Image (cartoon, rainbow, N blue to C red):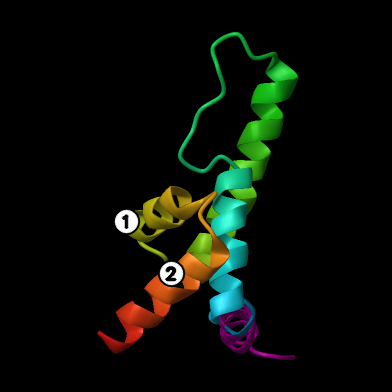
């Protein structure tokens, strides 16, 4: 039987491999905005719409948890939603080398 710790370590490394690149950052930024990670449904939303929004947010937060993103890191991704992906990559490159 394989060790559960080995399974979780492997999964964590896979998340890092997929989302740890510049392209991964662009995808995470898009998901943060699409999943409405920093928003709440309007008070007039139907229960179905609220459930759908909560589900999308939960998926993004699971990814963020696997990547050990801080709340500030999640907020930064959401803030970058809608920006030109090249600007996001430039910011990432500047941060890495600055």
| Between 11 and 28, the one nearer to me in the picture | 28
**Badge 1, how many Cα within 10 Å: few under 14, some, many 20+?**
few
From the image, give the main secondary structure of the stretch colored magenta.
helix
The stretch drawn in magenta includes residue 3 = yes
Part of the protein shown in magenta: 1-16
At x 52%, y 50%, the residue is 81
* 47 to 22, vertically: above or below: above
Q: Where is residue 26 in the image (x, y as percent from the top left)?
A: 57, 66
Residue under label 2: 68
Mark 2 falls on what kind of element? loop
Quadrant of the image containing the N terminus: bottom right
- In the rendered image, the residue lying farthest to the left is 98
Taking the spot 62% from the left edge, 44% from the top edge, the residue there is: 35
Front of the two marks 2 and 1: 1
**Direction from residue 84 to residue 90 in the image, left or right:** left
Alpha carbons under labels 2 and 1: distance apart: 11 Å
* Picture disc at residue 96: none
- Secondary element under disc 1, as helix, strand or loop, is helix
- Residue under label 1: 72
Q: Nearer the viewer, residue 38 or 54?
A: 38
**Among the 4 quarters of the image, the one containing residue 21:** bottom right
Please indicate whether residue 58 sits to the left or right of residue 80 in the image: right
Q: Residue 4, image x and y in percent?
A: 62, 82
């Amino acid at each position: 039987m394989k060790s559960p710790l080995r399974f979780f370590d492997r999964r964590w490394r896979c998340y890092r491999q997929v989302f740890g690149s510049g392209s991964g950052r662009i995808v995470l930024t898009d998901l943060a905005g699409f999943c409405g990670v920093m928003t709440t449904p309007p008070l007039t939303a139907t229960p179905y719409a609220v459930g759908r929004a909560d589900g999308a947010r939960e998926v993004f937060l699971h990814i963020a948890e696997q990547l050990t993103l801080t709340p500030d890191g999640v907020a930064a991704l959401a803030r970058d939603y809608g920006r030109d992906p090249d600007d996001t990559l430039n910011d990432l490159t500047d941060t890495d080398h600055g």
